[in-house]
Amino acid sequence: MATRGFTGRRTPDDHAARTPPGQALTTDFPVLSAGPTPKIALADWSFTLKVGPRPVARWSWEEFSALPRTSYVRDIHCVTTWSKLDTAWEGVLVDDVLAAAGLAPPTGFTLAHGFDDYTTNVPTADLVGGKAMIATAYDGAPLTPDHGGPARLLVPHLYFWKSAKWLSGLQFTERDEAGFWELRGYHMYGDPWREQRYDDDA
């Protein structure tokens, strides 16, 4: 199993510098969801790439599990003001999903879709270059349903609502289309270091 990009655990000396404004550190892993937790059998799981409305690639769980895997440690920040440092993830980089599909990033914007009909928008540039993965394991174990298992998007440099749970696919879009929380007043980008929580935050 490949573990490209592993950065190792850091010392606690720089915790304050790694905590965005308005955030408090936690050692727990709070569970927050827009709705009930769906139960997704691996036999029923699939992941689809779309360009606009057109599906261009699809993987079953078995096929997806055969893609190159990456492990890394990242800090995560929830818009509800908790941050958790040094979280350990494993999954498939979005770069490797695109490579397996034979695609260069086709548009500047992406809409992530969940099995629960949740959506969230992320600029495509924030998903490639090793910045984001489709995570299937956390802290050395398969990702549990309450944290988005079997697979969730992980975009650790943005507020955690952008890391869609129960991911079913990525859709490349020509324009920046608001997702579930963005339609309800959340920021279209969601940079925790700029406290971009709501749509009128700079």
Image: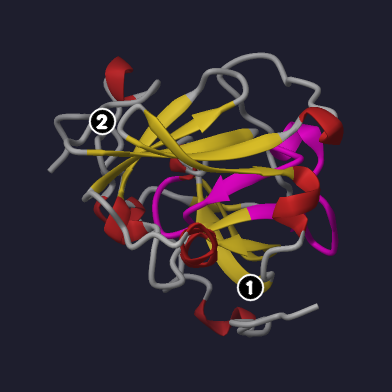
What residue is pinned by disc 1?
72
- Secondary structure beneath dot 2 equals loop
Q: Is residue 165 visible?
A: no
Say which label, 2 or 1, has the lower sequence index: 1
- Secondary structure beneath dot 1 equals strand
Question: Residue 43 at x, y = what percent?
Answer: 85, 32
Q: Residue at x 47, y 70 (%)?
A: 16
- Which quadrant is the N terminus positioned in? bottom right
User: From the viewer's perspective, is residue 139 above or below residue 121?
Assistant: below
Question: Residue 34 at x, y = what percent?
Answer: 56, 19
Disc 2 versus disc 1: nearer the observer: 1
**Could you tell me the amino acid type at mark 1?**
Tyr
101 sits left or right of 123 in the view: right
Residue 66, by quadrant, is bottom right
Tell me the crowding category of disc 2: few under 14, some 14 to 19, or many 20 or more residues within 10 angstroms, Cα based. Answer: some
What residue is pinned by disc 2?
198
31 sits left or right of 94 in the view: right
Tell me the crowding category of disc 1: few under 14, some 14 to 19, or many 20 or more residues within 10 angstroms, Cα based. Answer: some
Q: Residue at x 41, y 59 (%)?
A: 157
